[in-house]
Amino acid sequence: MTRPLTHRPRAALLALLLILALLAAPAPHAARAQSEPEIGRDVRVSLVTGETLFGVLVERDSERVVLRIAGIETAIPASRIESVVRQRTPEERYRSMRAIIDDDDVPRLLLLVQWLMERDMLDEARAELDDALDFEPTNPDAQRLSRLLDQRLALRERSDRARPEGDRDRARPERPDRSAPPARVQPPGRFQPEQFPLLTDEQINLLKVYELDLDNPPRLLIERDAVEAFLTRYAGAAGLPRTENEREEFFRKPPIEILEAMFALRARELYADVRVLELPVALDLFRENVAAAWITRNCGSVNCHGGIEAPPPHLYNRRPFSETAALTNFVILDRHRLEGGRPLIDYERAAESPLLQLGLPRPQSAYPHPDVPGWRPAFRSRDSRSFQQAVEWINAMIRPRPAVPIDYQPPDIEAIRAQNREAVAEDAVRPPAPDQEPEPDADGRTDQRR
């Protein structure tokens, strides 16, 4: 069920900012140890009158400080200034906030998207909103924000095209380079996206070929060159054309009949030439009713199988509705074996599959789930709709099971753990970040009584 954004959004955002402030709090005397703010950085200027101004530092000398506040440059005499303190950039605050939000916490992701849009960080907002829509594609608040964001991005694009090439950078001096995807800082224990290998497009297509049902096939495309190669390589085989007229008639056959002939002759070396244009029924059931419904959120949580310190099998816990993510997790689950060699998926007795039993409440399970912080059952009982949908998926899979020749290597956990330990060690010697400050009003001022 979609959770509305309208339930206490301001309270949730304040709580988020409070957590951020606690995380960002500097060590004793850190503020005094930090360097002087450089030109072009966000700063906080405290006046001798007790008033505080926020803006971008444009100029500073012994006589005055010039700030850009809401796009207007304002000069402040040095005699009126008590202190000038460097502020954390919006990008730094974004990374800190993102690191404490779970990937499936859609309400807080949407609050973060709003925060990013208010600061013109539209590319980051688009990336976060896409993730939220992956988890809740029908969420009305996410859809509304998506429409607004698309309008903002289109307006920015039109503005860029209308501006002379040499003026574009000067018009937005504070916008970081958007040529690469925005950096995504993950909470401790969470995989960075680049650390988790996914199936390639070619591997996904081959998996679809092996898993399709000839009686209920998806749309296929087999190029004439591939059919020609098949007929040449298997010339003279039973069921294949022998005359030129028969060959031309064979070329006109529906793709599924040509593939059936390939299957009959086990022409495995040519399966990769068959393009499967949509998911076979069984794999679509897995994506919709298993991967997106509970594998990603339950089994793929950081404490269960989606974290670097979690036990195997390690699962990819992003974009649950995408073919790539879902089918990568399917291959991982299909190939994993428990102690003693039993597979997670029992294709003969679907309801007894350890994968499903581990999702039941412990008293009802033949394979009770280990005690993991935050774990909750994926199913209420064996009679629940989601459990029965999982059984339906397993029963729809091809049997006997084919040996799909996909060379997939899961994440190298030991190498990733070593890499993360090095990163933590580097972070430990960096100077602490400045304290989080109250958000300024549109005119760059803040009321300390808030």
Image (cartoon, helix red, strand yellow):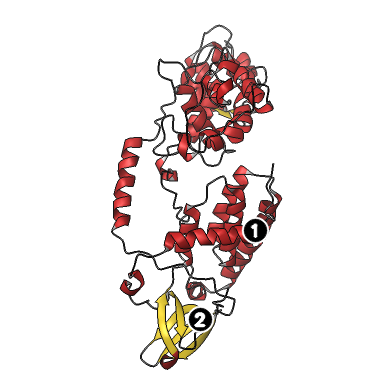
The residue that disc 2 covers is: 53
Q: Is 171 left or right of 396, judged from the image as shown?
A: left
Question: Is residue 87 shown above or below 18?
Answer: below
Indicate the quadrant where residue 115 lies: bottom right
Q: Quadrant of the N terminus?
A: top right
The residue that disc 1 covers is: 9
Q: Position of residue 64 (x, y in %)?
A: 41, 90
Mark 2 in CB contact with mark 1 (< 8 angstroms) = no
Q: Crowding near pointer 2: few (<14 within 10 Å), some, many (20+)?
A: some
Q: Quadrant of the C terminus?
A: bottom right
Q: Residue at x 53, y 25 (%)?
A: 358
Q: Position of residue 438 (x, y in %)?
A: 52, 71
Q: Position of residue 138 (x, y in %)?
A: 69, 45
Along the viewing direction, whichever of 10 and 337 lies nearer the viewer? 10
Q: Crowding near pointer 1: few (<14 within 10 Å), some, many (20+)?
A: some
Q: Secondary structure at mark 1?
A: helix
Which residue is farthest top? 238
Measured in 3D between alpha carbons, the distance from the residue under mark 2 to the one under mark 1, in whole angstroms, is 27 Å
**Camera sees residue 94:** no
Q: Residue at x 33, y 72 (%)?
A: 34
Q: Mark 2 vs mark 1: which is more N-terminal? A: 1
**Camera sees residue 52:** yes
Along the viewing direction, whichever of 146 and 240 lies nearer the viewer? 146
Q: Given the image, on which type of amino acid does mark 1 rest? A: Pro
Q: Position of residue 47 (x, y in %)?
A: 46, 86
Along the viewing direction, whichever of 253 and 282 lies nearer the viewer? 282
Indicate the quadrant where residue 296 lies: top right
Question: Is residue 157 shown above or below 273?
Answer: below
